[in-house]
């Protein structure tokens, strides 16, 4: 049993205070407070048929305590995560537009999903994973369509 003043080895790890991104190991409280307050952030609305989409949920964090209360009071959800914002063709990511820490707006007046975001440093690994899967899927689709076309023209 931990003595007063000693660290509890069974306590959940605390989120670091640095911002998210390749250098950080999570989404810190300072960045979350900025997102909730709207300081240095953007609002992005993404419709179902949009040519710009968020992909990935890295460094997911569910807000607790006063941060969760502040987020709900500001009309935001209590989940925060890092995502890559992509320019897409038919929902296939083509060009990365940036890496953001994202918190979703709970209710909005648009027929779209709204997000409050803060740009963070590029996470090359996260971008590379998305691009690899997207381009491999696209290549597979093109090869299937091409094979079907060749098979139909040979009849």
Image (cartoon, helix red, strand yellow):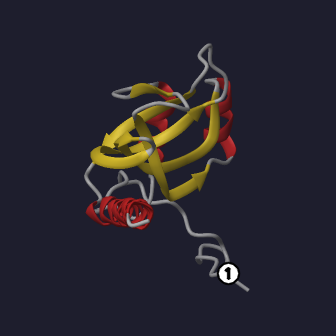
Q: Is residue 18 left or right of residue 104?
A: left
Whether 1 is drawn above or below 115: the answer is below
Label 1: how many residues lie within 10 Å, few (<14), some (14-19) or many (20+)? few
* Rendered-image quadrant of the C terminus: bottom left
| Horizontal and vertical percent position of residue 120 | 30, 46
Residue located 67% across and 23% down the image: 107
Q: Is residue 42 left or right of residue 110?
A: left
| Horizontal and vertical percent position of residue 2 | 68, 82
The mark total stands at 1
Say which of 8 and 99 sits in front: 99
Residue located 37% across and 60% down the image: 142
Dot 1 falls on a residue whose secondary structure is: loop
Could you tell me if residue 30 is visible in this image?
A: no
Residue most toward the bottom? 1
* Rendered-image quadrant of the N terminus: bottom right
Residue most toward the right? 1
Residue most toward the front? 155
Residue located 47% across and 55% down the image: 56
| Horizontal and vertical percent position of residue 72 | 68, 30
| Horizontal and vertical percent position of residue 12 | 63, 70
Say which of 7 and 15 sits in front: 15
Q: Is residue 45 left or right of residue 147?
A: right
Residue 6 falls in image quadrant: bottom right
Which residue bears the numbered disc 1?
3
Could you tell me if residue 109 is visible in this image?
A: yes
Residue located 64% across and 24% down the image: 75
Say which of 87 and 123 sits in front: 87
Whether 127 is drawn above or below 89: the answer is below
Q: Is residue 121 left or right of residue 32?
A: left
């Amino acid at each position: 049993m931990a003595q007063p003043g000693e660290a509890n080895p069974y306590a959940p790890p605390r989120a670091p205070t640095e911002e998210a991104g390749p250098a950080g190991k999570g989404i810190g409280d300072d960045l979350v407070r900025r997102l909730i307050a709207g300081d240095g952030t953007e609002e992005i609305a993404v419709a179902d048929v949009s040519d710009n989409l968020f992909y990935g949920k890295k460094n997911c964090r569910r807000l607790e305590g006063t941060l969760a209360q502040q987020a709900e009071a500001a009309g935001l959800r209590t989940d925060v995560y890092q995502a890559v914002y992509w320019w897409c063709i038919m929902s296939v990511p083509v060009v990365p537009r940036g890496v953001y820490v994202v918190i979703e707006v709970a209710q909005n007046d648009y027929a779209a999903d709204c997000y409050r975001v803060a740009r963070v440093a590029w996470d090359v690994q996260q971008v590379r994973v998305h691009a690899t899967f997207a381009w491999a899927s696209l290549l597979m689709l093109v090869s299937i369509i091409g094979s079907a076309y060749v098979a139909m023209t040979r009849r």
